[in-house]
Image: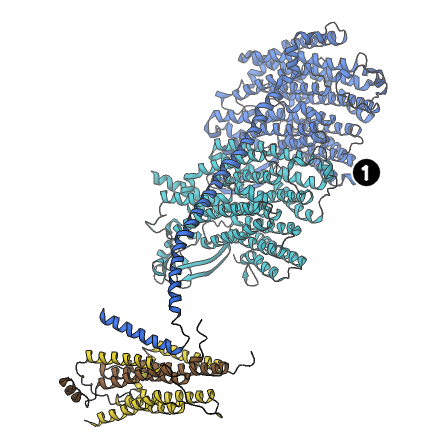
């Protein structure tokens, strides 16, 4: 335990790949929590964006530290593109749902069950 | 502690804190605006990773596009007059449990695989835009084209969905 | 007159009746008098042209053969053969020229006779049309210079014969007789056709002249003399059918179901003689063996039919058998080598036999009218036992009939004497040369029988008392249109039309014009050469003459003794030899025999084959279908219970789990997300542990 | 020789005009019965006119059979071209049409019989539209088989024909129609399967070269020209299959007189023999005929049966001349058995249609025998017999149809004495019957005579046995005539009427053709002569090659 903390203190200020990954992990976990707990569909979407951003950070970070290629960055671009498309369609769906059910609370919209 | 490290911690802090606010705020509007900060923070992290093009794209698309879209969504789905922008949360306990499992797993993963940080390669002091552009036009041409078609489809699909139905 | 013109004239002769036929069959009903005059006119013109052609031919081109050929089908360059053309054509030699006149003459007379005889018939116009098609096809046989056209004409006369025999087709017996005639002829025709196939297969031509040349050059069919003999015999098969030779003679008596003028034309004078004509045409091809077959067939026919004729009571049946017998004579004559004698007999026989039939037609016509008047539909107008004493009522018919009878019996001064005597001399010569003495014996015996049965009908029909006075009073002589042809034919039955010497026909112009052609077959298989035969023939002439006079006289004497003077009781003789009498009365049981072996057997065979087809072959087909069905049923059961069972079990199990897992489907997004994440975790740990 | 109308080749016109007609018929509302009938008639009429034009323009001097230069009105286009499919290689299938002396007569016959069949379909009542559509489709299938020179195309048309026939019998037929239709279908399908197998075996045995423009070169041609720029492919082209030089060495069907070639020949022969139909494969025919409606019987007997013998002469003989020589005697034997057997079984029938069906078997036996003779006269007889049998039997079935329409029975023993009641009918029927029994002066005689004359040069004994058939044929034909026309009229047929105008229109032209060709057959014989000489030559050469091989 002692060595762990000592190492941790030594490691912390030297920013490297792990730091980015940890930020990404935190964002991911928060995103998951947001998706799971929010009633409002738009808030759920925000959670999704967080998760996507977490993934993107990973891509870019690995691209920087993993080797000298840009494949990770390209993947990140595609993720962004996907996110944009997803946001557009998802919001359209939300609007549609709102028109039909007069609510955007996901727990009230469970017609998919059976 | 160099400037790079300080910058990282600052932006990492901004990102994580605003993300917390996004998730835990009761108000949709608050959440949305915190998300703005998260996005900016992530963009700054990209800059630190020498991914200038991605960073700009992040700002343009997430902040300029997606977030605005979400705000529109918020406004369209809530009666502005009778502003009640608070949203409830659901079964927080199982969610917390789940998230802690996820977090624990990731942490465990770090711990078990960590062998000390490798030194970053010397940063290339040129814009990545040109390289990315070339890659998109050569080896990633097919996914690029598919992505463009996808965007088109999404555009039309979204327009189609969002259209207010005349009486059905 | 040039050769070409003569040929064109002959073709015109050929086509005239055909044109008549076409006109009458299509427009006959609308023409005045139903078009009988049109057809009669056509054939009369043909007769005049024929006489002209004959005269020109004999005077200008006595020894030549005129021909007119045309390419009918061109096969171009045939592999293995070279250029091949099917050339058909007509030609006129003395034989054909004489035959032309005979056919057109008899045909014309029969046309005139028919105008009277067929008066008021329901199918009057059709009748004349068919006479036209018959004349056309008969003339085609006469004119053809190749086997193909011969065969065509051959079948077409068969067709017209069929149509005319079945003229009164409402009667079952008539239509049966037509069919019998056609089919029996066809049997002979198969042989004829196979003969043609043999010759064509080797020489690739139908032309008779070309075939003769090839054979003469030493090319034999399939390189063997055996095939040459076979070809000859097979071609003769055609003659067997058409000329009603044994064993295919059975159709001719039945053919008497047709109208009597038709019997006179087709079944006495012309068509049936076509077989003889065919043998004469192909004579050079015949080997000694083939001629031997021909001789024996002819002799057998002559003998069998003469014996049958003795016992018959129907006037036309007697004449029919007499025809067969005389045809056997001609065939026998040709077979023994007395070529011109055989053909000469054909001509003279055509005249007097046509006369006999027309005479009998006249009698039947009268009888029929009398019976009709009496409303008697049971008495047979053709049965000689119902007649008698008609001489008084029908003098013209009687006298002409008597002349014809004398001619057929071979009494001097008649044409029949000349020709018959010549044939008999031939048989004697043949017997001397080859040692087959049965042939002349049969010849003379039949001559005697002929005289006997012919006088039997003359006596029973015209002499004595009529059986029913009432009917007798109703009988009248036939009209002029019927008696004039009889008189013409009677005149033609005297010797002076044929030969200036009443005792020797060989000096007559017909015999001189139709000299026996030289054989073309190799010497090793040829019959006695012409010189040798003529020598023997000449030698036998006087013997034959006296012998034939003796047997004819004997025959006539017995006939008078039996039927006129009643010295011998016919009934008693019949009783004493009742077995033989029955045998002859039933025509040697040929019909019954054929009924059993040919018709019965083939009908039985067809039934068996039908059963075979429906049961065995179809059974195999249906059986394999059934097996397939059973197999499919089994595999269907397997499918339902085993394979489907397995599938259903899978489905059931999935369903079970599905129901169990359904609970997790809350319809809430969060649950799904949580599960997804949870799943990722599970995967991760699974990967770690493995 | 080129012959195109409005830029489209005449053979394509003659083949696909009925399909155009079918589409138009399908667009007409089904209440407009007359419009359907008349437009069908118009299209088969046009087809007949085109067929006549083809015959007029036909060059009698060209042989065809196994050379594309000898084929006339050739139309060629790439139909299917799939580049390199794994081990299968490049698949290149051509739309290759062309006629020679062998097929031109059949093209004319098909057009003629289809025309007559449409006229005789006037009395069809039940779902008219579907009927005519199927009839026209059938027409295209038949025509396509006669004009295609690519085995694959041939096979496609062969199968296209099968389906409409099945429905035409199965829907518009008599009481046992389902049984008859399924029997027909299974029989022919069985044959098709064998054909398909042989076709595939041939495909993988024959190589040709092809350049970038799709021009095909045989192996020899390619060797002379040099193979640069050429691709070696397998082919379905029949004409290339007939060139022994194109066979891949050591492939299944290469060589001469090998047992695989014999086997392939037998397979093809059975496939075609079912269509003829030859003796042991014939039992579908009587059932199909009895149940089929009159026009379908007419097409079945008039055209479909010819496909079998045509296939043998078009495909089997030129591709496998050695096997043909080897099996000629057996084929002739089957022909003779069919002749005798068909005639004898026909004699035992009491059903009018069944009788004629069996007579068809007998007459097609003549074709088989003539074909097996392997010489010009015999094969000329055979092809001419195909044409004549088409016209004569079509007439016979129409005749049965005429009486059936009036009396609603086909029992021969129920009639009698109709001659007086129906004179026109009697005249026409007599012509048809006498033509069928081979009376000289009518076309059937000439073809039968030449078939037998030719066959006799090759098989003496068999031909003599076969010749006996003409007696049996005369027997049952005359017996039938007697049972229908002669004798006295039964009471129940007192009010039968004679033929009407429509019936005369369909029967009289056929009768005229029969009489004309009976007297002067050259117009038709000349069409086929050069081709058949060439085919005989081919067999002749093959015989030489076989004998050389044996030595």
Identify the image quadrant of the C terminus of chain D: top left
Q: Nearer the viewer, residue B51 or D420?
A: B51
Q: Colour of chain A?
A: brown
| Above/below status of C669 relative to B15 | above
* Apparent colour of chain D: cyan
Which residue occupies the foreground of this view, C16 or C357? C357
Give the SS element for disc 1.
helix
Q: Name the outermost residue toward the top.
A: C567
- Image x and y of residue C223, in percent: 46, 28
Establish if C106 lies above or below C659: above
Q: Which chain is yellow?
A: B
Q: Position of residue C57 (x, y in %)?
A: 67, 29
Residue D77 at x, y = what percent? 47, 61
Q: Which chain is blue?
A: C
Say which quarter of the image contains residue A67: bottom left
Residue depicted at x 33% and y 78%: B140
């Amino acid at each position: 335990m002692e060595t762990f903390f000592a190492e941790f203190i030594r490691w912390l200020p030297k920013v490297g790949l792990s730091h980015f990954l940890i930020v990404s992990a935190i964002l991911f976990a928060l995103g998951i929590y947001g998706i799971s707990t929010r009633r409002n569909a738009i808030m759920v979407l925000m959670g999704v964006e967080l998760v996507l951003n977490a993934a993107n950070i990973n891509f870019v970070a690995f691209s920087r530290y993993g080797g000298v290629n840009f494949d990770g960055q390209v993947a990140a671009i595609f993720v962004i593109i996907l996110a944009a498309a997803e946001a557009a369609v998802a919001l359209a769906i939300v609007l549609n749902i709102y028109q039909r059910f007069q609510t955007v609370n996901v727990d009230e919209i469970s017609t998919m069950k059976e | 502690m160099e400037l790079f490290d300080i910058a990282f911690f600052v932006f990492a802090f901004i990102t994580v804190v605003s993300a917390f606010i996004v998730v835990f705020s009761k108000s949709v509007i608050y959440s949305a605006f915190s998300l703005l900060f998260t996005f900016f923070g992530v963009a700054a992290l990209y800059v630190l990773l020498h991914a200038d093009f991605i960073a700009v794209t992040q700002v343009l698309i997430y902040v300029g596009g997606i977030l605005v879209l979400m705000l529109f969504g918020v406004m369209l789905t809530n009666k502005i007059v009778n502003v009640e922008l608070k949203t409830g949360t659901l079964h927080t306990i199982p969610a917390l449990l789940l998230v802690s499992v996820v977090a624990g797993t990731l942490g465990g993963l770090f711990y078990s695989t960590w062998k000390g940080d490798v030194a970053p390669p010397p940063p290339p002091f040129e814009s990545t835009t040109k390289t990315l552009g070339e890659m998109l036009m050569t080896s990633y041409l097919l996914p690029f084209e598919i992505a463009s078609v996808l965007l088109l489809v999404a555009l039309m699909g979204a327009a189609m969905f969002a259209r207010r139905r005349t009486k059905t | 007159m040039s050769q070409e013109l003569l040929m064109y004239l002959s073709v015109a002769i050929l086509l005239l009746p055909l044109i008549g036929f076409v006109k009458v069959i299509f427009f006959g009903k609308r023409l005045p008098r139903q078009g009988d005059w049109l057809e009669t006119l056509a054939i009369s013109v043909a007769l005049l042209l024929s006489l002209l052609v004959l005269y020109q031919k004999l005077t200008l081109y006595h020894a030549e053969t005129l021909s007119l050929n045309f390419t009918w089908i061109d096969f171009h360059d045939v592999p293995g053969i070279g250029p091949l053309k099917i050339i058909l054509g007509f030609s006129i030699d003395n034989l054909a020229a004489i035959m032309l006149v005979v056919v057109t003459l008899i045909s014309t007379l029969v046309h005139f006779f028919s105008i009277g005889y067929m008066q008021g018939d329901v199918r009057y116009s059709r009748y004349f049309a068919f006479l036209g098609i018959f004349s056309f096809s008969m003339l085609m046989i006469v004119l053809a210079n190749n086997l193909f056209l011969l065969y065509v004409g051959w079948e077409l006369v068969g067709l017209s014969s069929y149509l005319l025999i079945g003229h009164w087709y409402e009667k079952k017996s008539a239509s049966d007789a037509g069919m019998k005639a056609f089919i029996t002829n066809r049997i002979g025709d198969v042989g004829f056709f196979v003969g043609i196939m043999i010759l064509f297969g080797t020489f690739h031509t139908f032309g008779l002249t070309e075939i003769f040349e090839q054979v003469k050059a030493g090319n034999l069919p399939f390189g063997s003399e055996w095939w040459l003999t076979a070809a000859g015999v097979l071609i003769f098969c055609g003659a067997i059918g058409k000329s009603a030779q044994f064993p295919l003679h059975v159709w001719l008596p039945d053919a008497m179901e047709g109208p009597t003028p038709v019997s006179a034309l087709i079944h006495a004078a012309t068509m049936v003689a076509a077989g003889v004509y065919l043998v004469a045409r192909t004579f050079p091809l015949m080997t000694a063996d083939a001629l031997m077959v021909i001789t024996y067939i002819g002799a057998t026919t002559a003998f069998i039919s003469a014996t049958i004729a003795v016992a018959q009571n129907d006037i036309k049946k007697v004449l029919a058998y007499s025809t067969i017998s005389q045809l056997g004579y001609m065939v026998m004559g040709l077979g023994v080598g007395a070529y011109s004698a055989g053909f000469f007999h054909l001509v003279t026989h055509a005249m007097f036999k046509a006369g006999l039939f027309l005479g009998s037609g006249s009698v039947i016509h009268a009888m029929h009218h009398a019976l009709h008047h009496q409303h008697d539909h049971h008495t047979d107008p053709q049965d000689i036992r119902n007649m008698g004493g008609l001489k008084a009522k029908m003098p013209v018919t009687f006298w002409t009939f008597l002349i014809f009878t004398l001619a057929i019996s071979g009494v001097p001064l008649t044409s029949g004497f000349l020709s018959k005597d010549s044939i008999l001399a031939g048989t004697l010569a043949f017997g001397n040369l080859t040692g087959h003495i049965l042939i002349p014996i049969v010849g003379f015996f039949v001559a005697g029988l002929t005289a006997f049965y012919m006088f039997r009908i003359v006596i029973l029909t015209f002499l004595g008392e009529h059986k029913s006075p009432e009917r007798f009073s109703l009988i009248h002589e036939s009209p002029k249109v019927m008696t004039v042809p009889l008189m013409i034919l009677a005149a033609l039955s005297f010797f002076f039309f044929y030969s200036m010497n009443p005792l020797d026909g060989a000096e007559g112009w017909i015999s001189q014009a139709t000299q026996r052609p030289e054989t073309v077959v190799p010497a090793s298989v040829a019959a006695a050469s012409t010189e040798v035969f003529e020598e023997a023939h000449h030698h036998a002439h006087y013997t034959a003459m006296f012998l034939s006079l003796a047997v004819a006289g004997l025959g006539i004497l017995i006939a008078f003794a039996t039927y006129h003077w009643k010295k011998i009781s016919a009934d008693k003789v019949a009783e004493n030899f009742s077995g033989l009498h029955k045998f002859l009365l039933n025509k040697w049981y040929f019909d019954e025999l054929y009924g059993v072996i040919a018709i019965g057997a083939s009908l039985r065979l067809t039934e068996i084959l039908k059963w075979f087809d429906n049961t065995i072959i179809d059974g195999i087909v249906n059986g394999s279908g059934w097996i397939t069905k059973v197999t499919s049923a089994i595999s269907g059961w397997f499918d339902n219970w085993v394979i489907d069972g397995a599938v259903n079990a899978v489905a059931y199990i999935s369903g079970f789990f599905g129901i169990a897992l359904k609970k997790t489907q809350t319809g809430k997004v969060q649950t799904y997300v949580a599960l997804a994440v949870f799943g990722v975790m599970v995967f991760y740990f699974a990967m770690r542990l493995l | 020789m080129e012959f195109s109308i409005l830029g489209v080749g005449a053979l394509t016109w003659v083949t696909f005009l009925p399909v155009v007609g079918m589409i138009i018929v399908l667009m007409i509302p089904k209440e407009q019965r007359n419009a359907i009938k008349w437009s069908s008639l118009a299209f088969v009429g046009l087809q007949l006119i085109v067929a006549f034009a083809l015959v007029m323009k036909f060059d009698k001097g060209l042989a065809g059979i196994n050379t594309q230069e000898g084929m006339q009105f050739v139309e060629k286009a790439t139909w299917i071209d799939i580049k390199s499919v794994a081990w299968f290689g490049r698949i290149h299938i051509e739309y290759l049409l062309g006629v020679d002396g062998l097929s031109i007569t059949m093209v004319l016959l098909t057009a003629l019989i289809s025309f007559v069949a449409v006229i005789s379909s006037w009395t069809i009542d039940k779902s008219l539209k579907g009927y005519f559509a199927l009839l026209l489709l059938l027409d295209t299938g038949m025509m396509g088989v006669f004009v295609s020179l690519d085995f694959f195309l041939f096979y496609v048309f062969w199968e296209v024909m099968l389906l409409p026939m099945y429905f035409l019998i199965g829907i518009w037929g008599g009481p046992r129609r389902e049984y008859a239709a399924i029997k027909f279908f299974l029989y022919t399908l069985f044959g098709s399967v064998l054909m398909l197998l042989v076709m595939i075996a041939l495909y993988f045995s024959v190589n040709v070269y092809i350049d970038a423009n799709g021009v095909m070169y045989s192996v020899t041609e390619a060797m002379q020209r040099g193979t640069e720029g050429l691709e070696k492919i397998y082919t379905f082209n029949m004409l290339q299959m007939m060139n022994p030089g194109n066979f891949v060495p050591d492939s299944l069907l290469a060589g001469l007189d090998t047992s695989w070639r014999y086997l392939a020949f037998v397979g093809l022969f059975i496939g075609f023999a079912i269509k003829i139909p030859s003796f042991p494969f014939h039992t579908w025919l009587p059932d199909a005929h009895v149940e089929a409606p009159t026009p379908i019987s007419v097409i079945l007997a008039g055209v479909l049966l010819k496909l079998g013998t045509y296939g043998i002469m078009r495909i089997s003989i030129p591709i496998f001349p050695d096997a043909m020589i080897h099996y000629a005697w057996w084929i002739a034997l089957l022909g003779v058995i069919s002749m005798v057997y068909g005639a004898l079984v026909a004699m035992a029938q009491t059903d009018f249609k069944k009788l004629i069906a069996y007579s068809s078997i007998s007459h097609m036996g003549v074709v088989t025998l003539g074909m097996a003779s392997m010489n010009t006269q015999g094969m000329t007889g055979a092809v001419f017999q195909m044409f004549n049998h088409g016209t004569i039997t079509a007439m016979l079935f129409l005749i049965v149809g005429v009486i059936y329409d009036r009396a609603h029975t086909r029992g021969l023993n129920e009639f009698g004495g109709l001659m007086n009641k129906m004179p026109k009918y009697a005249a026409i029927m007599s012509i048809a019957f006498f033509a069928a029994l081979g009376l000289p002066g009518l076309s059937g005689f000439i073809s039968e005579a030449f078939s037998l004359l030719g066959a006799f040069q090759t098989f003496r004994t068999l031909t003599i046995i076969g010749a006996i058939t003409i007696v049996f044929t005369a027997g049952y034909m005359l017996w039938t005539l007697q049972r229908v026309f002669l004798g006295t009229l039964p009471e129940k047929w007192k009010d039968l009427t004679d033929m009407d105008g429509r019936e005369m229109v369909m029967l009289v032209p056929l009768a005229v053709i029969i009489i004309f060709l009976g007297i002067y057959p050259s117009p038709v014989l000349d069409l086929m002569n050069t081709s058949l000489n060439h085919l005989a030559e081919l067999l002749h050469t093959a015989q030489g090659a076989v004998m050389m091989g044996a030595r």
